[in-house]
Amino acid sequence: MNSLPRVIQFVIIFAALFGVPFLYEVRPVLPSDVFYSVAFGEALFVVDAALTFIRPRASYYLGLLLAAVAFAATVTQPAHYQLVASGDVSAAATIFVGLAAEMTLMVLVPWYLVSSRAKSPGADADPARS
């Protein structure tokens, strides 16, 4: 059995679980409207974590989308760079761990989807010849 789907499932579940302390950490520093949109994204990660047990392939697509959006939101914020530069170890660790999880999903999900398509029966069949 291929272990790559299990690794992807683990990273999605980790991202959902990691979001709880993350929300606790950012609550005092974010305006309420920004906090609620971050909390909504976290809720989507929780839904995605549950989805990994029900519809894994759909979960991978949702996880990839959520990771890309979270990654883009993280790297475009100058405040995140200021937090890292300030020496706040807890905040920097949170940013780096979150980015690592997002990048892991953005690499592993496409890799799995492409490799599973190549291994599926009929993948070599030319639809134009049928």
Image (cartoon, grey):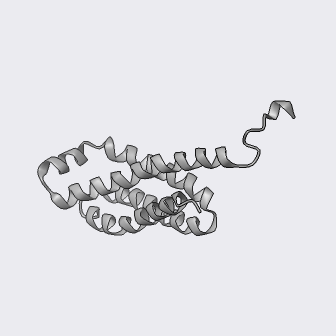
The residue at the point 22 percent across, 45 percent down is 81
Identify the image quadrant of the C terminus. top right
Percent coordinates x, y for residue 111 in the rendering: 53, 46
Image-based side of 127 in relation to 26, left or right: right
Image-based side of 24 in relation to 90, left or right: right
Percent coordinates x, y for residue 92 in the rendering: 21, 55
- In the rendered image, the residue lying farthest to the top is 128
Percent coordinates x, y for residue 47 in the rendering: 53, 65
Above or below, 17 against 32 in this view is below
- In the rendered image, the residue lying farthest to the left is 87
- In the rendered image, the residue lying farthest to the front is 1
Percent coordinates x, y for residue 90 in the rendering: 20, 61
Pick the residue in front: 115 or 102: 115
Image-based side of 90 in relation to 69, left or right: left
Above or below, 129 against 5 in this view is above
Pick the residue in front: 109 or 90: 109
The residue at the point 55 percent across, 69 percent down is 50
Identify the image quadrant of the N terminus. bottom right
Pick the residue in front: 117 or 78: 117
Q: Quadrant of residue 14?
A: bottom left
The residue at the point 78 percent across, 34 percent down is 126
Above or below, 35 against 50 in this view is above
How many dots with numbers? 0
